[in-house]
Image (cartoon, rainbow, N blue to C red):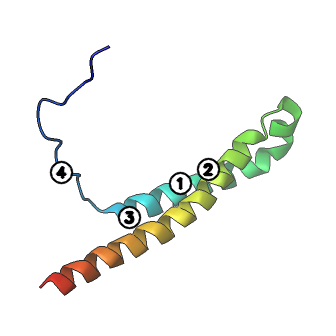
Amino acid sequence: MAKWTPRHEAPEPLEGPVVPVITGGTILWFLMFLVQLPFYGWFADHGHTWWLWTCLAGAGLGCVGIWYVRRRDAAIKRAADAGR
């Protein structure tokens, strides 16, 4: 099998509003958890409680993501200020 070599350079990564995107996604995961919570009995009867816990896990991991991207943005700004 021949080794694959790229024919052109990879594009620069896109930088966008990362913090609002991660925050919005985290809020959506938590809202989905809250909307499904009143129906816990139905989910338990049908063996679908993992839907609730998936939403809660998404919200929890989103909180870690918010912490990470805020620190990343702060580090990028510090590096840009130090480079001036």
Which quadrant holds residue 41? Answer: top right
- N-terminal-most mark, 1 or 3: 3
Q: In this orientation, which residue lies closer to the viewer: 27 or 42?
A: 27
**Residue type marked 2:** Met
Q: Left or right: where does residue 70 sit relative to residue 52?
A: left
Q: Which residue position holds label 1?
A: 28
Residue 8 spot, x, y in % from top left:
11, 34
Q: Distance between the residues labelled 4 and 3?
A: 21 Å
Determine crowd level at label 4: few under 14, some 14-19, many 20+ residues with C-alpha closer than 10 A.
few
Residue 23 spot, x, y in % from top left:
46, 63
Q: Which residue position holds label 3?
A: 20
Q: How far apart are marks 1 and 3 (CA)?
A: 12 Å
Residue positioned 48% across, 55% down in the render: 25
Element under disc 4: loop
**Residue type marked 4:** Glu
Instruction: Report how many numbered discs are placed on residues in the image.
Output: 4
Select label 4 or label 3 by which is in front.
4
Which quadrant holds residue 44? Answer: top right
Select label 4 or label 2 by which is in front.
4
Q: How far apart are marks 4 and 2 (CA)?
A: 34 Å
Select label 2 or label 3 by which is in front.
3
Q: Which residue position holds label 2?
A: 32
- N-terminal-most mark, 1 or 4: 4
- N-terminal-most mark, 4 or 2: 4
Q: Distance between the residues labelled 2 and 1?
A: 6 Å
Element under disc 2: helix
Residue 78 spot, x, y in % from top left:
27, 82
The residue lying furthest to the top in this view is: 1
